[in-house]
Amino acid sequence: MSLRNKQLPPKVLAVSSGKGGVGKTNLVANLAYSLAKKGQRVLVFDADVGLNNIDVMLGLVSNVHIGHVLSGKRKLEEVLVEGPEGIRVLPASNGWQELTTLENEQKMVLMEELDRLSASFDFLIFDTGAGISSNVTYFCCAAHETLLVATTEPTSHTDVYALMKVLFKNHQQKHFKLVVNSVKSEKEALDVYRTLSSVIDRYLTHVTLEYYGHIIQDPNVPKAVRRQKAFVELFPYSKASICVNDLCDKVISERSQIPMDGDRVFLWKSVFQA
């Protein structure tokens, strides 16, 4: 780890989609693994706090979760689970309906706990839930960047647009990055990007959407899911893994692009107050 990286605050990414079933959690798991493989210290927060997903995806088991942190029974570091390549995972609860909408006091507890621990990491990744709930928008607003995951399905485009609209209208979020999952070619991914961009240019004139990458359809992806492993670990030279590694390199290259006056305590308190 370079001295420069140690001096930088953690880069905070929110990965969201609007629609469920687009492979968002799988992308988070594999991106986190790739980042760790390249020497980055990564904390993944399963921010769909009422339903656990990321730990199941990676075959991890834990008897404690975010609910125990929010209730004050455990410190955050006491519920972290170590995943492959040393990534740390903050698990969501398993079916705690009361956590599907966090109260302001819970958000404050979570904010303070994350801020206390985040200095030990280079990247903090929020794997948000599906939809446009207050939990989803909260974590998107608390991140430096929001990565939106879409597929070629029209419903995916509609839901991604809806999420951008809510984040812009209600929270003044203006810049988003798009990753198009499960495509046959980069051309197909760029077609999705152009479709969304044309709608944004027409109806959300102050919003910008950046094409950030794509993941090629790959039969190794469902094989890895069934084995509860990251596909970049099991099939490092597969087409999907090459795409994730390209995305990983891009994320690392932009590691230093953090507003130095926007420390996490200040940003999260601003979000909380809003």
Image (cartoon, grey):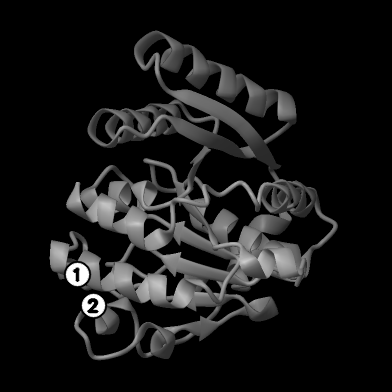
Q: Residue furthest right?
A: 237
**Crowding near the residue tagged with mark 1, few <14, some 14–19, many ≥20 C-alpha atoms within 10 Å:** some
Residue 33 at least partly seen: no
Q: Give percent across and percent down for residue 187.
A: 72, 23
| Label 2 SS | helix
Structural distance between the alpha carbons of marks 1 and 2: 6 Å
Query: Residue 34 vs residue 88: left or right?
Result: right
Query: Residue 240 vs residue 88: left or right?
Result: right
Residue beneath the point at 27% across and 67% down: 50
**Crowding near the residue tagged with mark 2, few <14, some 14–19, many ≥20 C-alpha atoms within 10 Å:** many
Which quadrant of the rendered structure holds the N terminus?
bottom right
Residue beneath the point at 40% across and 70% down: 115
Query: Residue 214 vs residue 21: left or right?
Result: right
Mark positioned earlier in the residue sequence (1 or 2): 2
Q: Give percent across and percent down for residue 209.
A: 52, 27
Residue beneath the point at 65% across and 23% down: 190
Q: Which residue is mark 2?
A: 70
Residue closer to the observer: 207 or 153: 207
Q: Give percent across and percent down for residue 86.
A: 65, 80
| Label 1 SS | helix
Which amino acid does the dot numbered 1 rest on?
A: Gln
Residue closer to the observer: 106 or 200: 106
Q: Give percent across and percent down for residue 9.
A: 55, 63
Are the residues flagged by discs 1 and 2 in contact, CB closer than 8 Å? yes
Which amino acid does the dot numbered 2 rest on?
A: Leu
The image shows residue 97, relative to residue 260, as above or below, that is below
Residue closer to the observer: 253 or 89: 253
Q: Which residue is mark 1?
A: 106
| Quadrant of the rendered image containing residue 117 | bottom left
